[in-house]
Amino acid sequence: MNNDTGSCEDMLLMIPGPTNIPESVRLAMAAQCIYHRGSEFAALLDDCIRGLQQVIGTARPVAILTASGTGGVEAAVANLLQPGDRLLALNTGKFGKRIGDIATLYGAEVTWWDCPPGGAASPALLKRVLAQGYFTAVSFVYNETSTGVMHDIAGLGRIAHDAGALSIVDAVSVMGAAPIDMDANGLDAVIGGSQKALMLPPGLSFVALSEAALEKACRTNRASYYFDLPRALAAIEKGQTPYTPAVTLMSGLREALRMILEEGLDAVFSRHAALARACRSALDAMGLPLLPTDRARCSVTVTAAHAPEGMDSKELVTRVRDDSHILISGGQDELKGKVFRIGHMGDCGIAQLARTISAVGAALGQLGVAVDAAAAAAVARDEYTRHQENPDA
Ligand code: PLP
């Protein structure tokens, strides 16, 4: 075990990725590697794409890229935007900003729309902004991991679509945990990553493009050789990827998708919603205010809360790690030291969450803030059960 990096076989990962990997997924990845130009690989690719299509809610093919989530985001940008194109980038936090930064690098003319930390982007406001001028595309993050806010994917997507702008949607930290309904919501580029709710190690990203987006990609002077999405999508027709893929990770992906679909998408989404609600209630019980300002827009995969007045959230994170072998996260960028974040996605249930709440409560006590950790963990369990029995309440 290495306490500095948090690498430890028995370390429970309650961070917003990477997440805990189920044993059957690990075993699937331990099998002999197969040849990526053969029929066995074509079947594997087909299984993975079919599973992803269900998770994303699309009939469109999905490119599977050997890259972390950022690679998928960069691929979408590189294929949809070129110098002269205009992007409205919703700066919702670290990851919303990243999309705009990448677009700037590719020469797009980026207009920023800043959201206050913890606030949710309003579709009505987006409508007003888009009415003021033409944008080639609008980018936003469905689940802004840095703030724990889940933005209104349906509302924002629909408004962008109606304004004739392509939507570029980073769904990296929520794909497999909440509905995306890409086709129904008229979304144009949806990006996912492997190491979050899809219960895999890092290394794969997924990009689905609408027909309009693919058409734009074909017209774009694509400034990336490796991340050429028309090429990747054309290769799928032959049961292949353009370059050597991460076959081992894809074997794990097939198993992870099998598990998700066996549990049932609705059941998986409900479990995540219940865990999030349980986490929020437990933090309420400990008197820790949430970062998101609108509870209705709290993330189902990561809960962000303020550390007690005068406490550096890093101290709390370190104490939970060292005393309980549980990793939670601190804040990012300007939220560093101020907030902490608990990830509850993928292979995660109420037992792990309740353990985490107990650990946070105990750590607060060690740091001089007395809370009733056992009572907070009981609140989490009760709330989880209540939600699972009556999700609409
Ligand atoms: N987008 C979001 C919303 C994320 O949460 C992350 C990672 O945490 C990324 C993008 C970047 O993914 P990666 O670190 O896999 O490149």
Image: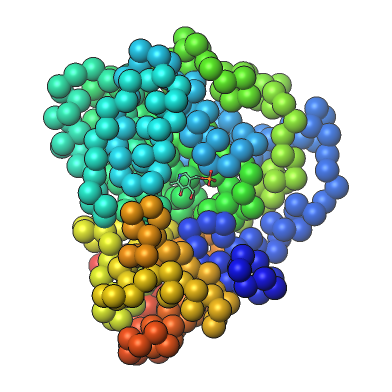
Residue for point 35% across, 12% down: 84
Q: Tell me, what colour scheme is on the image?
A: rainbow
Above or below for 66 versus 93: above
Q: Nearer the viewer, residue 43 or 368?
A: 368
Q: What residue is at 24 percent from the left and 44 percent from the top?
A: 115
- Residue 57 visible (yes or no): no
Give coordinates of residue 261: x percent, y percent: 56, 52
Q: Name the image quarter holding the N terminus.
A: bottom right
Quarter-of-image position of residue 147: bottom left
Residue visible at 72% across and 39% down in the picture: 246
**Total number of numbered discs in the rendering:** 0
Based on the displayed image, in which of its 4 quarters is residue 122 positioned?
Answer: top left
In this rendering, position of residue 166 left or right of residue 122: right
Q: Position of residue 244 (x, y in %)?
A: 75, 30
Q: State whether residue 148 is above or below residue 227.
A: below
Residue located at (28% from left, 62% from top): 291
Is 284 left or right of 22, judged from the image as shown? left
Left/right placement of residue 180 relative to residue 23 reads left
Q: Nearer the viewer, residue 13 or 279?
A: 13
Indicate the position of residue 270 as horizontal and vertical percent values. 41, 61
Check the image and report above or below for 239 versus 191: above
Quarter of the figure with the C terminus? bottom left
The answer to whether any part of residue 144 appears in the image is: yes
Image x and y of residue 169, in percent: 40, 36
